[in-house]
Image (cartoon, rainbow, N blue to C red):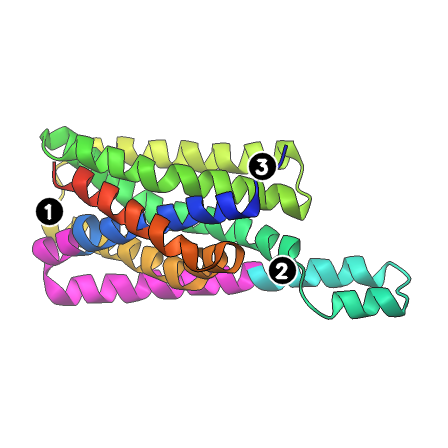
Amino acid sequence: MQIPKRVLAAMLSFAAGALITALAFELFEDSYEQGGIWRAALGLMVGAVVFTVVSQRLDRAAEGSREVDHGSEKLDTDAAAQDAAPSPSSVSGAAGMALLAAVTLDGVPENVALGVSLSEGSGGIALLAAIFVSNFPEALVGSASMRTQGRSHAFILGTWSACGVLLILAVIVGAGPLSSATPETLSLPLAFAAGAVLASLADTLMPEAYENGGPAVALSTAAGFVLSFVLATL
């Protein structure tokens, strides 16, 4: 059973709204307070550049795969006209890998910060809830997008399970070896995560949500922002 595209778009825009809160109040603000504006700005730009490069490479790889598939088939006139415009399924499928990259690039520093917060006994639960609210819809939509692209269930479960294990290890590292790290040291990964989040919002999440859901996704984006903000301020 496939989830309707409008439902997926609403979930994706909800995740985007939650990520805006995490970007502004959990990541970049903390980075600025702990390391100053120069560290925060530098880390943010590096995170944005890394995500953009990774996203472009994934898009090119997906386009190359589709070109090979088309080249192996005998195209008639109608098929050639149909292939002239990208189909929604191919665009959505390519977004699945981009979402995986977004969850990983912003999730690792974010979960390191979660581990540090839990070790200090302050703010960790709210941050944990905000991470879940934002990452769960992304993972669900990303998995559905990969399935649309034709990826096997084993590939989808394997990649997202590996991502989950990596994020768990990030929490353990934050609660252990980095629990006594200086604020300046923690400032850079937090800013890096903020940059990756910002780039993923502009490059993938919001365009993909609007393409499949239309103007109505503005409401679910606002809902995601408000809920995540409430959780972040508890």
Q: Can residue 177 be seen in this snapshot? A: no
Residue density around tag 3, few if under 14, some if 14–19, many if 20 or more, within 10 Å = some
The disc placed on residue 61 is 2
In terms of image quadrants, where is residue 118? top left
Residue type indicated by callout 3: Ile
Q: Is residue 108 above or below residue 82?
A: above
Give the overall secondary structure of the magenta segment: helix
Q: Which mark is residue 156?
A: 3
Q: On the picture, is 32 further left or further right than 67?
A: left
Q: Is residue 129 above or below residue 210?
A: above
Q: In the image shown, does 147 or 222 lie closer to the viewer?
A: 222
Give the secondary structure at mark 3: helix
Q: Nearer the viewer, mark 3 or mark 1?
A: 3
In the image, taking residue 102 as reference, residue 181 lies left or right, namely left
Amino acid at pointer 1: Thr
| Residue assigned mark 1 | 182
Q: Is 204 inside the magenta-drawn segment?
A: no
Looking at the picture, which amino acid does disc 2 mark?
A: Ala
Looking at the rendering, the stretch of residues picked out in magenta corresponds to: 29-58
- For label 1, the SS is loop
